[in-house]
Amino acid sequence: MAGRRMFDSSKLAEPETGFNGRDRSRGVVFLLVLLVVAGFLVSCGGSGGSKTTPVPSIQNINSSTTPSSPLGLPIEINGSGFQSAPGKVVFTQNSTTATVVPNSSGWTDTGIVVTVPSTLTAPAMVSVTVVTSGGTSNAVTLNLIQMLTFNVNNVTWAQTTALPVALTGLRAAVVPGASSTSAFVVVTGGYDGTGNQTSVYSNTLNPDGTVGPSWVSITTTSLPTTLAHHTMVEADPTNSLVSTSSRFVYVIGGQQNSTDTPGGLTSVYQASVDPTTGIVGNWTQLTNSSLPESLVGPAAAIFNGQIYVVGGLRADGTPSPNVYSAPVNSDGSLGTWTKQANVYPSGVSFATAFGFGGKLYVIDGDPSNSTDPNAEGSVGTNAVNFASASRGTVGAWTATAATIKSRKKHITWTAFGQVIAAEGIYQGLPGSLELERTLVNSDSTLASWNGITSNTNQIGANVYNAAAFVSPLLSPTSTPRFLLLGGQTFTMTPPGALSSTVYYNNAP
């Protein structure tokens, strides 16, 4: 354009001579410097160099697809952009809003532990958001469940459809069905008196605690190997990040052959379960998620998207004190096992474990060396310990109220903060204290144990190495149903007879 000189970048390398040329060259350089500085300030969020504060984002609650919680118990919120210092967690239920500022010890940039306010209403849904100086997060729905009260001293027992075969060392898992009124039970493995089995059985579960009139023997997808004294857990959308239509069962460790002393496997097998029929699919060995050591009679619990395994007999017959955790992936596979820095206070096998309120509890077990998992042997320990368990990390162990009887190869039922320890090998005559119970205090300790001694409240099973579970279906009286399957008779003059009986409580 006439009368206007176009900018030539070559002049930066060879500036013009003379006063006017030097002025123009310096001006161009100064302009470029200003542009660079301005760009830097914009990228840093303005003057002062402070970065733009991110808006918090919730990925999930309790590492579950459809999370739930009772009132007054802690939940885990996972996400990003929460910052290092506590902001607020807001619970919105219709026109009611409850705001909580969690403790700094439970707040990180990617995770929050917060207690659900008792001022909310359950059962119902609540919307959860996180608020920081960066703004308000997306909302995630939490299902609030009611903490039902019941008197375990009023429990009475009956029998339902027996197993097809008398078994000891078997394991069972309950599988929620496709609707809120349906559920199934899956039984795996066990010893039938001649050898360990590959058996897989399935049955329907009714709200009154009974099972269906006949057990389905799933021969086309039996276990890949003979197995007994393993542990077994079930993953579904309420306890893991699997899809809403997915159900998976996991068989972990155990004894392959009944002649092993005690042997032990590192194997982890997984199978899907159809939530409409209860049929078990093909078993897959999760070779990338094998246990770090072979274990017979380990204890296990699954909650908040993690499987925790405690103790078990090693191949040389010594009890392990190790604690392992592995995450459940969205496709039902498992991540690698992490060995926890906080090992259990002593080596133990044939204990029981459960999760409640963000804590992992371990009850009793056998602290001695052993080579025969089917034998009665000496009594176990009455030690009970608990530790925080969050996102696969287990904290330091704390001793709490010991059981009245020192039990091993026993069972434990938990429901709405009440705990029942039962059966197994213990000191005294068989049946002298078949059941004892406690409850979880608000500080996570257990209250003193009380024996259930009335003859009308006894099961009358007197077995060890049985399988047990709590039904996810409430009874017609809105109380939990506890089931006991199989086992070997505790006689003090072994070997006791094997059992195929299935017991359930028909009251309260």
Image (cartoon, rainbow, N blue to C red):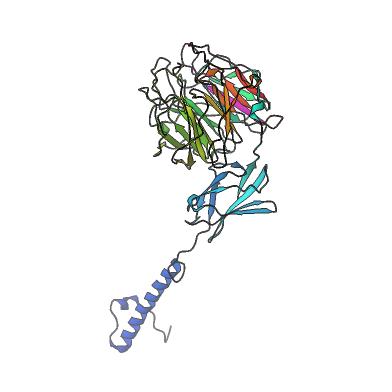
Q: Quadrant of residue 70?
A: top right
In-image side of 119 versus 340 (left or right): right
> Magenta segment: does it hold 13?
no
The answer, for residue 249, to whether it is visible in the render is no
Q: Is residue 40 above or below residue 171?
A: below
Query: Relative to 307, is 441 on the left or the right?
Result: right
Look at the image and say whether residue 185 sits in the magenta stretch: yes
Residue at the limit of the structure toward the bottom, as seen here: 19
Our reading of the magenta stretch's main secondary structure is loop
The quadrant the N terminus occupies is bottom left
Give the residue at x 66% y 36%.
Answer: 148
Q: Position of residue 8 (x, y in %)?
A: 35, 78
Q: Can residue 236 be seen in the rendering of this structure?
A: yes
**Position in image of residue 75 (x %, y %):** 56, 45
Q: Between 51 and 171, which is closer to the camera in this rendering? A: 171
Can you say which quadrant of the picture contains the C terminus?
Answer: top right
Q: Which residues are magenta?
A: 178-199
Task: Please tell me how many numbered marks the rendered image carries.
Answer: 0
Q: Nearer the viewer, residue 271 or 54?
A: 54
Which residue, as the protein is rendered here, is positioned at the far right?
476
Residue 118 x/y as whole percent:
64, 47
Front residue of 135/356: it is 356
Horizontal and vertical percent position of residue 30: 36, 79
